[in-house]
Image (cartoon, rainbow, N blue to C red):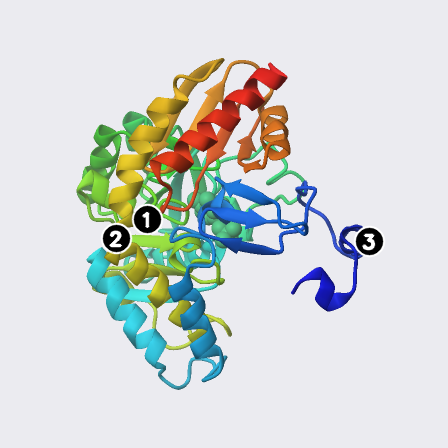
Amino acid sequence: MQLKDVNLTAEQVKELCTKYMIETYERFPFIACRAEGMYLYDENDNAYLDFYGGIAVNNAGNCNPKVVEAVRNQVGEIMHTFNYPYTIPQALLSELICKSTGMDKVLYQQSGTEANEAMIKIARKYGVDNFGPNKFHIITATNSFHGRTYGALSATGQTNNALQLGFKPMLEGFTYVEYNNLKAFEDAVTENTIAIMLEPCQGEGGVIPATQEFMKGIRKLCDDKGLLLLLDEVQTGWCRTGAIMDYMNYDIKPDCVSMAKGMGGGVPIGGMICTAKLAATFGGGTHGSTYAGNPVCCAASYAQINELLDRDLAGNAKVMGEYFSNELRKLPNVKEVRNAGLLVGVVFEGDKAVDIKHACLDRHLLVTAIGNSIIRMVPPLIATKEDCDKCVDILKEAVLAVM
Ligand SMILES: Cc1ncc(COP(=O)(O)O)c(C=O)c1O
């Protein structure tokens, strides 16, 4: 929809949003009117270099033509039917997901937080069904982020900020332990623990990758104690970190993985993949959702994942992630650059991250800030050296302007 189609000015669009929407986000001061590849265009057709990728969603590029075509085709066939009949997009997508991740079964949802709800629920039911009513406790990491619905929010190890304040009490049965500290996880296991739930790289928590030693140690701890390893790959999954799924970078196999964002290329789809043994926990009536497995979303996701795989965008994320991070280290006032493929966090000296973000915006570069000192970038995985160089140049100007 363009302004000319609705006969509104840009100011009127902003006024309507401000007047009628509950605003929980600080908005960019423009209207997103179209997008293509690495760029987003405003109401005056100004181009913005997109290094936030709809927050790690547009992995195969904004409005990837194959995804757009898949949506257009499916929308005219069946838009929605609920999960009683089988559908062709579900069949094709499920086979593709299971074969490319090495997991046995998939269950669809609409978002990352719902994917985590499903993962938490299946783990708890598995524990209670097999080991008794108290076996439902899950250990997660401090500083983690798993979503905004109550189960996922309860799993989130940020208990003293806007995420949880005012919303307590959280669901019982979660313990939070220091990330990358294997001993702390070992010590936290009790007779009631059924699972450990982790992001393989903490994204919202400031781009902190798990160490190899930690991840492998956690897998062994789970094996030794009979626990499930649940990985939240909502942000890291689908080629973002240089492998199809981030757990492949650690050469481990989790019991269950949640995913969303990059698997849909812009349509609301999420899901949970797991082993056949765990999948058997959910039978008729145990879990469900009206839109989960929607044919338009599944058709889009099938096109998106094929694009990611056919073009080896995981490989590009790995190579570009290294190149980009090294270039970012040359910027002024940089304390540290952390990355897992093209999930990149730049830690700056001082507390000017939000000002840097705004200065980037003024120069038509889109990035996000985490806290006061980190700029996080999750660009489409089609990013080239030239795109990364351009981003670094603009960031440099922005940093010099504010610091
Ligand atoms: C690791 C992780 N888990 C869960 C979520 C929640 O996903 P959604 O916003 O789709 O509910 C996010 C979102 O940023 C995330 O990064």
Residue 200 in the image: x percent, y percent?
33, 39
Which mark is first along the chain, 1 or 2? Answer: 1
Q: Which residue is mark 3?
A: 19
**Is 38 drawn above or below residue 90 in the view shown?**
above
State yes or no: discs 2 and 1 in contact (Cβ < 8 Å).
yes
What residue is disc 1 on?
230
Read off the residue under disc 2. 255
Name the N-terminal-most of marks 1 and 3: 3
Residue that appears at 57% across and 28% down: 371
x and y percentages locating residue 31 in the rendered image: 67, 51
Amino acid type at image mark 3: Lys
SS at badge 2: loop
Could you classify mark 1 by the number of other residues whose Cα lies within 10 Å: few (under 14), some (14-19), or many (20 or more)? many
- Element carrying mark 3: helix
Mark 1 touching mark 3, by CB under 8 A? no
Q: For the point 33% across and 23% down, which residue is it?
A: 326
Indicate left or right for 312 with 352 as reference: left
**Residues under labels 3 and 2: Cα distance?**
46 Å
